[in-house]
Amino acid sequence: MIIASNLKTNLTRSQTTSYMMDVENFLEKNTLSQEILVFPAQSSLSAHSGQVTQGAQNAYATTNGAFTGEIGTEQLEEFGIKTILIGHSERRHILGESQESLVTKFNFYKNLGFKIVYCVGEPLDVREQTDEVMMKYLDLQYEGIDTSYENLIIAYEPVWAIGTGLTPSLEDISKIHLKLKEKSTAPLLYGGSVKVDTAKDILACEGVDGVLVGSGALAVENFCKMITFAEEAGK
Ligand code: 13P
């Protein structure tokens, strides 16, 4: 399974370095077969070697250039980063990234062979409508995306569950994941208010290949516990 921590706009570089080291130490002491990804804040990226894969929460579709506030592959290469998160709901909804711009970014990083964690998810007003409406909404987020890309991981993150403490029922998580799996055979993570208390049950759901965790993984010991739960789930 894939256990991923999205640190968002949290932790300084030194805090992030010790977070990464704590996870590495945990993995060294325990023989585990999970794939571990950590996405630090942009200014907290640094050189890292070990079992944990460091990814970027965002980057522009460029090598370098005049894109104020963005980073490109020149900055990622400095730290050997070949993994990127694309389409996170906070970038879609707060930063206003369109599906068109996400497709451009996706194709740029796909052509460079990056591992891409591509996020999809519906807001509450869509969720409150019929299943058909919801699936149509999610369909649009797959538009233009090469769902057979070999280095693709998809994360289903309902917008209304992110940072709210709310999650869909376990039945709903399975139901939606199985539907989304009809669109792509890429590993499918669940994200949205996963906590140490709920991770075990979510990881056990049919159709769930891992989790993408925000606030619930900020305390490194909780993130490590989730890695153990994934191992115990034996998938
Ligand atoms: P929370 O776990 O804080 O709800 O955030 C989820 C998320 O957005 C992970 O990418």
Image: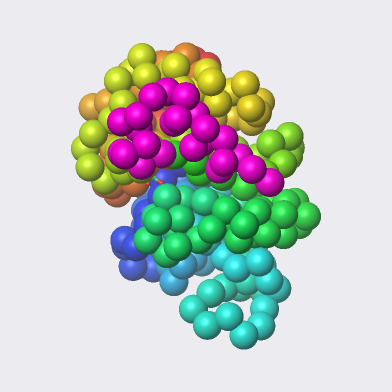
Q: Quadrant of residue 216?
A: top left
Q: Nearer the viewer, residue 192 or 34?
A: 192
Q: Please tell me whether residue 73 is drawn above or below residue 205 in the rendered image.
A: below
Q: Is residue 109 visible?
A: no
Residue 140: x and y, percent? 57, 41
Q: Is residue 162 visible?
A: yes
Q: Please tell me whether residue 143 is drawn above or below residue 225 in the rendered image.
A: below
Residue 130: x and y, percent? 38, 24
Q: Quadrant of residue 230?
A: top left
Magenta region: which residues? Answer: 122-144
Q: Please tell me whether residue 89 is drawn above or below residue 40 in the rendered image.
A: above
- For residue 107, side relative to residue 207 (left or right): right
Q: Nearer the viewer, residue 150 or 105?
A: 105
Q: Is residue 26 magenta?
A: no
Residue depicted at x 36% and y 42%: 123
Residue 24: x and y, percent? 46, 45
Residue depicted at x 57% and y 35%: 139
Q: Residue furthest right?
A: 111
- For residue 64, side relative to residue 96 (left or right): right
Q: Nearer the viewer, residue 194 or 50?
A: 194
- For residue 42, side relative to residue 35 (left or right): left
Q: Is residue 133 magenta?
A: yes
